[in-house]
Image (cartoon, grey):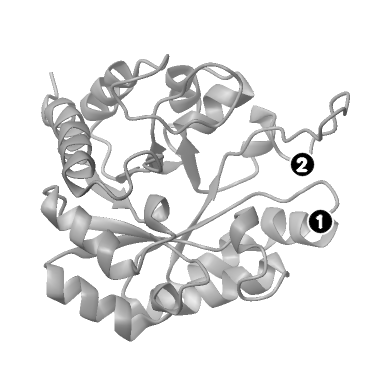
Amino acid sequence: MAARLLLSTAPFYRLPLRDAFRHAREAGFEAVEIMVTSDPATQDARTIAELAADFGLSVGALHAPFLLLTRRVWGTDPIGKIYRATQLAEQAGIPLVVVHPPYKWQVRYRRWVEHRLAEYSARAGITIGVENMFPVKLRGDRGLRFHAGQDLEALDRYTHLVLDTSHLAVAGYDVLETYRRYRTKVLHFHLSNNAGKGWDSHLPVDEGVLALDTLLDEVARDGFAGSISLELDLRTHLGDDRAIRELLVRNREFCELRLAAKT
């Protein structure tokens, strides 16, 4: 079974969810990953199902509201967010929920993720993957790290992993070496390139410093049967449907070409 290619709705968070589905369909994608935001449509199973039917798309993953811009969606308790996301995924028939690792001060959440997440996921029947993040520093700070688990050893504690290639670049890790280390745990990718300047740029896959062609070649040879979601920064293109379509088509074809080659 080949890897499944998705388009994340995250770049369209300022637009109605219908627009994100439309862009995915027009660019030739067959599936999406939904980012839960303050938009009620992203939180409603019936709306999601109706949009999927209208555009002939399936939903392969649901990203729980862990970003700063969604920090108050479904409350501020990360465990509560996971419960809500899992319930929504079950109602909408979405097989995967993506969550973030704990911040340093989230001691209760860290213990829950490390000791109870896998059991809860199995009981709920929804796979929950923990996404790798990167150190976040305050201006003028000498190295305060917000996230507790950014050393690779911290990822060893999680059963299922979501590898974000741009996040790996910011954290200073090699994407291919990290995939090889965790290939038995990785079930989903957030795929984008990075400018190599220390910030989370989420560039198109064929731009930037990361050799994503090499990564995809190895993923294909491995027979990776998980999913790969294009999570791109499209802010400079919003308002220009033609430019968005051309960029998304180019990125989709870049990935499909390599995922189809297994030798």
Going by the image, does 119 lie left or right of 105?
left
For the point 72% across and 35% down, the residue is: 136
For the point 46% across and 30% down, the residue is: 165
Which one is nearer the viewer's eye here, 178 or 132? 132
Q: How many numbered tags mark residues here?
A: 2
Give the structural element (helix, strand or loop) at label 2: loop
- The location of residue 22, given as percent across then percent down, is 19, 61
Gap between marks 1 and 2 measured at Cα: 8 Å
Q: In the image, what residue type sits under mark 2? A: Ala
- The location of residue 143, given as percent across then percent down, is 84, 26
Going by the image, does 57 lie left or right of 44?
left
Going by the image, does 260 lie left or right of 113?
left
Q: In the image, what residue type sits under mark 1? A: Gln
Which one is nearer the viewer's eye here, 174 or 25? 25
Callout 1: few (<14), some (14-19), or many (20+) C-alpha neighbours within 10 Å? some
- The location of residue 162, given as percent across then percent down, is 47, 44
- The location of residue 81, given as percent across then percent down, is 61, 70
Mark 1 = which residue? 106
Figure quadrant of the N terminus: top left
For the point 45% across and 79% down, the residue is: 40
**Vertical comparison of 182 with 104: above or below:** above
Dividing the picture into quarters, in which one does residue 88 lie? Answer: bottom left
Which one is nearer the viewer's eye here, 104 or 51? 51
Tell me which numbered mark, 1 or 2, is placed earlier along the sequence: 1
Q: Which mark is residue 57?
A: none
Mark 2 = which residue? 148
For the point 14% across and 47% down, the residue is: 27
Callout 1–callout 2 Cβ contact below 8 Å: yes
Going by the image, does 249 lie left or right of 154?
left
**Vertical comparison of 28 with 50: above or below:** above
Which one is nearer the viewer's eye here, 166 or 84? 166
